[in-house]
Image (tube, rainbow, N blue to C red):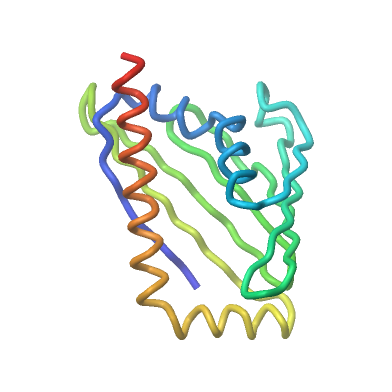
Amino acid sequence: MEFHSKEDIEAPIAEVFAAISDFGTLERSALRRGIELQRTGDPAHPENGLAWDLSFSFRGKPRAIKLTMASYTPPSGMALDGSGSGVDGRMEVELLALSPQRTRMSVRLKLSPTTLTGRLLVQSLKLARSNLNRRFKLRLADYARLTEERLSRTA
């Protein structure tokens, strides 16, 4: 199962990359949403094996996921691999400079089951695909808008 969306941000590519790789801010945001996390590795050098152990409740069941930095290529993007609770996933964030002050952020999330439980979970997600696609696009648009606002305040 795959989700994909693109958003344009009115900011230079280097600033957008700095914002999306601000792991401290992302971790605080996850904690506010009720996700417990434990980071391993140095966020100053994410290419050297930065990883997170996440635990949260989804659809009434506790879930645990291990996220690992798969690639980190400033300022063009990064990829994260995740596995746990019967599902493997990969999230790729690509940045493209459209102009000196405009950047396109493209995010792709791919989920694949590894167990029968994971297969049932992914199948239930497929049944709600249109709603989940809409929510994914709205969440990315909101993240892009917030990033743009934050960067315009600091400029």
In the image, is residue 13 above or below residue 145? above
Q: Residue 119 location, x and y as percent?
A: 65, 82
In the image, is residue 144 above or below residue 149? below
- Quadrant location of the C terminus? top left
Residue 90, picture quadrant: bottom right
Q: Is residue 42 left or right of residue 151?
A: right
Q: Is residue 31 left or right of residue 146?
A: right
In the image, is residue 21 above or below residue 29? above
> Which residue is nearer to you in this view: 36 or 125?
36
Q: Residue 132 location, x and y as percent?
A: 42, 70
Residue at 74% from the left image edge and 36% from the top image edge = 49
Q: Residue furthest top?
A: 155
Residue 28, picture quadrant: top right
In the image, is residue 37 above or below residue 100? below
Residue at 24% from the left image edge and 30% from the top image edge = 10
> Which residue is nearer to you in this view: 32 or 144?
32
Residue at 39% from the left image edge and 23% from the top image edge = 15
Q: Residue 42 location, x and y as percent?
A: 73, 26
Q: Residue 41 location, x and y as percent?
A: 77, 32
Residue at 52% from the left image edge and 64% from the top image edge = 110
